[in-house]
Amino acid sequence: MAGTKTFTMIKPDATGAGHTGKIIDRIIGAGFSLKAMKLTQLTREDAESFYAVHRERPFFGELVEYMTSGPIVAAILEKDNAVEDFRTLIGATNPAEAAEGTIRKEFAESIAANAVHGSDSDENAAIEGAFFFSTRETV
Ligand code: IDP
Ligand code: MG
């Protein structure tokens, strides 16, 4: 059975462009509830660790530079079928390929600066949520 939690970040391009509130509104409007949320900025060590799975990819350096370039909003979200439904809401990694009405179609600047993160599995949702939040910080 699909899990009920996912993890997201509003990335530096979107926070910097003043899109934080609009993106949160879209997420809540799509039926997700906020279980935890914080504004923070990733250190290089944080970003390298969070994206360790992409270490060997050619864009890793660019990704770490970008993700440390400004504030991010991290959040744990709850909804039935959370991981899959959130990936549908945000759209394809490359905004040029993202469907109409998706968050990345509306707010992303490029394949790197693509406005939001969404976990790709229930297992990663739990790992990524725990990277940012203790049980004490989750409602
Ligand atoms: P996802 O965020 O849609 O799950 P992933 O393949 O997991 O996409 O890649 C993680 C992040 O790395 C992307 O959200 C994007 O910020 C960045 N990224 C992915 N592919 C590229 C690329 O080809 N060039 C630059 N950055 C990329
Ligand atoms: Mg991914």
Image (cartoon, rainbow, N blue to C red):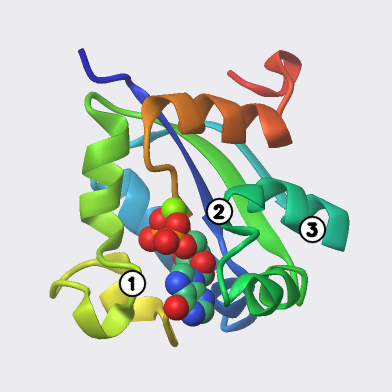
| Quadrant in the rendering for residue 16 | bottom right
C-alpha span from label 1 to label 2:
13 Å
The residue drawn where x is 41% and y is 79% is 108
In the image: residue 58, left or right of residue 130: left
The residue drawn where x is 71% and y is 69% is 64
Q: Name the spot of residue 103 as percent of width and height, x first.
A: 31, 67
Dot 1 falls on a residue whose secondary structure is: helix
Disc 1: which residue: 104
Q: Name the spot of residue 13 as percent of width and height, x first.
A: 58, 79
Disc 3: which residue: 42
| Quadrant in the rendering for residue 120 | top left
Asked if one can make out residue 19 in the rendered structure from this viewpoint, the answer is no
Asked if one can make out residue 62 in the rendered structure from this viewpoint, the answer is yes
Q: Report the number of discs.
A: 3
Q: Amino acid at mark 1?
A: Arg
Q: Amino acid at mark 3?
A: Leu
Label 3 Cα neighbours within 10 Å, binned few <14 / some 14-19 / many ≥20: some
